[in-house]
Amino acid sequence: MNHSSDNIMRDIKIFYSLTKKDLKLELRSLSTILITIVFAALIVVLFNIAFPFGVAQKSEIISIIIWVVFLFSSLIVSSGMIELDTKDNSLELILMYGIKSEIYFLSKSLSVFIILSVVQLTIFSLFYVLFQLSFQNPIIILVAILTNIGISSITVILGILSIRNNLNQNILSILVIPFTLPYLLGAVEVTNQLTQSGNINYVLNSIYALVAFDMIFLITGAILIGVYFKLEK
Amino acid sequence: MIKANNLSKSFNGNRIFSGIDLSIEKSTVLGVVGNNGSGKTTLLKIIAGLINSDTGSIKLNENIKLDFLGHENMLYQNFSISENIDFFSDISGFRISSESQDDIELALGLKNIVKKKISELSYGQRKKASMLRSLTSAPDLLVLDEPFSNLDSESTDSFITILKTLKKENKSFIISSNRKDIVGSISDDLLNMEDFNES
């Protein structure tokens, strides 16, 4: 009993150390976060010019643009966060110390989630200013968090899987689309409904689906990364 | 301490080496020598558990702590030397006493720069920083891949002195190098990779 609680405490400590390291390194350089925010802002401004006010089905289009911008921003963030460990091969040391692959995956997903939340906040603020999009319903925050969890975990899975692939990060942007399309359609639908009617009853099923997808991505990721690291040896 | 039998490895159908047996006891140094491409790094990575061999097995005694120092410095460039040591100690769960760490920092000439970022250090200083990192995890067996490459003679001497001191404290080492003269002078046994390469 004591032995297993010691192991859990050690896993928690390692999880905390790995996440703290990622965030500390990112806050020190700000390289990933700045590039992503500039990229996202540029796309939002371009769309603002392309879709003048009064365009038919503006709300639907904006809901799609929000999540497409967010998806591609997440690719930059996850690539940057994974590169922290692969650039000078410190990942080999982390694995040599017998760190559980699921702990590594979950901590990396949390680091990406936190950085992406800052980016997400910037994207939503830009949409509020440039498109006068109203986020009256606080449920939109829940949707943003749920979508962020899913996108963070799927991009970390694909990012780790492409570490030693010859095509490396280029393949990430191609692989991510079929995996996230059904997920993003749900997020678009919920955002559209909430910004139009604000009635939660219309979107409950989509929210349940987002929760289910998050669980699937997190559990599958933890298992898949473990298998991948073993095969890579 | 560690025993390996019949190790072999191929990459893309090319056999790098085969039939390697080795055994390391407490307080010994095994030198692994051979030309570039003879498989020294691959063998050391197999011993460190970073990659699997195609055949054979490795038996490591229980409670033996092993650490690895590779070609790359394996340190975070935006962290200082001490931040890197703190992070890797946290995740490995092992760390030598601060007095012992002070002694090694002094011997390696890093005492006044431990707060400097890795990116601000010269190549030689980075190499010494990664040596310091590997020594602070209190390993019983330290696997060192080309530790003397691109080191000046003064740093090489100080590193050899540290290894000899640690050897007296029951530590063991596997050291690869193409500098047979240096490795030969500190090793109890030498393994020449060319004897196990397929011609």
Image (spheres, rainbow, N blue to C red):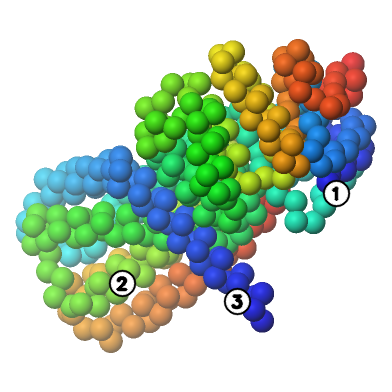
Label located before the other in sequence (3 or 2): 3
Q: Is residue B154 above or below residue A115?
A: above
Q: Give percent across and percent down for residue B72.
A: 56, 30
Amino acid beneath label 2: Val
Residue of label 1:
B59
The quadrant of the image that shows the C terminus of chain A is: top right
User: Quadrant of residue A196 in the image?
Assistant: bottom left
Asked if residue B197 lies left or right of residue A148, the reply is right
Badge 2 density bin: few <14, some 14–19, many ≥20, Cα 10 Å = many
Q: CA distance from mark 1 to mark 3?
A: 28 Å
Amino acid beneath label 1: Lys
Amino acid beneath label 3: Ser
Question: Residue at image x 46%, y 57%?
Answer: A17
Q: Could you say which is closer to the camera, residue A231 or residue B131?
A: B131
Q: Is residue A222 above or below residue A47?
A: below
Q: Nearer the viewer, mark 2 or mark 1?
A: 1
Q: Is residue B126 above or below residue A153?
A: above
Labels 1, 3: one chain: no
